[in-house]
Amino acid sequence: MAATINLMSREDGYSSCDVGISKEQWFELLQDSVIIGKTMDTLLKFFRSSEHKSTCKGVTEEGSPQSANAMITAFAKRVGKKLNINVIGSDGKQTFWPIPMKEGRLLSDGHYEWTLRDELAEAIKDWLIHDLLKRYKEAYLSVPLDHNGADELYKWQLITECEGKSELDIIQKFKTKNIVDVPRVNQVLTYLSKEKPQQLADNFASLKNEDVPLSVRLSDFKNGMADLCGDKFNVKANDERTAAAFLTCWNPEKYTFYKDELYQNYSNYIGDQTKKTGLKYSHYLKLLEPFVQTIQQDVELMDKFLTETNGLVQSDLLIAQNILWQMKDIMNMETSKSQNDSKSEPNMIPEEIQKYTNILRLKKNIILQGAPGTGKTYNTAALALTICGVTDMDMNDHEAVMERYDELQKEGRIGFVTFHQSMDYEDFVEGIKPKTENGIVSYEVEDGVFKKICEEGQKHPNNNSHIYSSTNEVNDKYDDIDRAIDSFKKDIPKEGISIPSVRSDSKYFLVFKNGDDLFAKGDGNPYKLRMKFIRTGDYDLNHQSYEPAVGQYIREHYMDNPSSPHVEEATEKNEVIRDNQNYVLIIDEINRGNVSKIFGELITLLEADKRIGGDHPIRVTLPYSKESFGVPSNLYIIGTMNTTDRSVGNFDYAVRRRFAFATLKADKELVRQNSLQLAVELFEAVELFIKKHQIDMDFEDLMVGHSYFFAKDENELELKWQYEILPLLNEYIKDGIINAKAINSDKTVADFLLA
């Protein structure tokens, strides 16, 4: 018998009641796909509203608020039925919104404002944490912490090196690491370590006094650093990020590294209000507590980190911080998707695409494999756009995706090639091809699609392209600027290095050598640097951009006293450096070509650390043009492979280990969402048929893809069956990968369902 609960009207205009559902019960309900249905997005919009309070209009970016109303009502009905709860309104009729909402009131504009129940809000927070960890495991569980190009193991190595060390020793170890704002912090700490070592050590030591609240310690530390710096530095190295770095290196069991971007990101993701400066770090540590507890209960996650950090100092807080750092883009995407502001920029990247994007960014090469109709073409296009930085469109809109894809292909950002049995190195990389002019045949070296897109990528290196970043220490530093310049020149590799602009530390330009001269290259032609300005530091920032940036870089990284001369803040008159660009090469039917033969000696260059910009960049001399050639770090390769195609051989190990493989599966739920019920029944019948008769191939490699079942009506479904699905099944039978008799070509959908 259902429990009947009466909705009570209060004097303040709100209506409320107690339905008696605990946080734990709500959490179980949220994990029940039947109960939650498609309501989570709407619930999250209420959850991320101020005080978890909004109206249907407030959580609806476009279109009719009735859709949000219908979602919550349907969800509440399912919960009420599941738990035998029956809420009666003041009119004597059954009402549903008060089940998930603790109170509501009618506003003057005619809209009804509702507030999520506290227990439901807490359950949603737990659900978000579990969901984030699930996504992390899908993308990164098999990715080593010290993966080339995305090394995170250095954090554990750092806290291990700092164990038991003095304040000054700890400062020396963390000041050049990416856990602080190195360009600003390093020069301050280097100077104070030399000129005022004891005062500097004492000020940092004050952070260790845990009898004093953390917020007070941070305030005292900030004032102390300001006094030590005086007027010498504009930035005093007294921020929460620097303090957090020291505390973590001192006691990683109680503290972890901090970055304001990550704090803001995670706070928004779990629906918490951020604090003001000085209170942020302590709030961040508080927010991490339930996150850490959830991690500790996950055996797979704990095993991964314990195994990979074996022999190093352990820190569950550092595990949490590392996971959040890896997942920051997903958190930002999810938060943006559920913002209430109708003007918020759309950023709807499907979960699968985001997962493949994370893998591709790490590995640089991925192959999307699956049976026909599983969405390889669609996913490839959407993945290419995401890698190229397209975030202003709905990736579920296939027509819009393909339109933007065509635009980037015309711009040269995306290349496309189909492999086949006769494809060779000469077509793909470079080869000697005949050319007829005035009846005379000559032979010239012609570039292939791979070489062309590699050269395009090298023209616009991204921010990770061989940056001598602040995480790389220079062993010998000098008081003399000329000796510092000479040392800098010796460190420049053949391909050059990327230097941050003085206008924006997110902008970079390339510096390279030609003889004894230095050249800079941004968006235009190479520019010869005038060394006299770099030596003296006498810059005209209205007209100079490269010399100030290079001069500042040399002083920060190659001189003992990096504070001279000061580079002023940039102005709008300064040169704008071109944003980094990623490039994508799509190889369709990659398994139909002899990959080892087509890539030749360049197969080694595909590895992330062997790319130009990687930890161990390699160049080769091409056989025909005799040019020096390397693969840039901003080129990503996406291959597609039909898993049912047995007409070609498998990849050899040398090729396979250089690619990540992602299997796309037939999804019945997509058929349910995009087609009619008869299509779902046909999907299930085909699924049963294949499972019953498959021989030596995995079911996922054979199951007919969901797109084959999309139909507007039964007529279209019948045509798809007759001319697409049935012929494919018969082809499986003919090839011997399904052990069954051929299906009669005049058998209808109804006939097959009854068989």
Image (cartoon, helix red, strand yellow):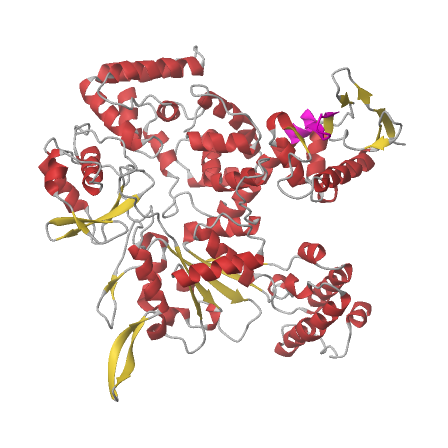
Residue furthest to the top in view is: 211
Quick one: which residue is furthest to the front in this view? Answer: 109
* x 30%, y 75%: residue: 431
Q: Is residue 502 above or below residue 741?
A: above
Measured as percent of width and height from the top left, residue 38 is found at: 69, 44
Q: Is residue 615 visible?
A: yes
Q: Nearer the viewer, residue 199 or 295?
A: 199
Asked where in the image residue 416 lies, by quadrant, the reply is bottom left
Please provide percent x and percent y for residue 58.
Answer: 64, 34
Residue 567 position (above or below residue 672): above
Whether 478 is among the magenta residues is: no
- Left or right of 714 on screen, residue 416: left
Q: Quadrant of the C terminus?
A: bottom right
* 553, above or below 465, in the image: above
* In the foreground, 152 or 7: 7
| Span shown in magenta | 103-123
Across and down, in percent, residue 212 comes to 43, 11
**Residue at the (84%, 33%) spot, across then down:** 84
Q: Please give the name of the residue rendered at 46% of the width and 38% of the height, measured from the top-left corner.
A: 305
Q: Is residue 135 left or right of residue 177?
A: right
Q: Quadrant of residue 132?
A: top right
On screen, residue 268 above or below 452 = above
110 within the magenta span: yes
Can you say which quadrant of the picture contains the N terminus? top right
**Closer to us: 186 or 211:** 186
For the image, the number of numbered tags is 0
Could one spot residue 638 in this view of the protein? no
On the image, the x and y values in percent for residue 660 come to 46, 56
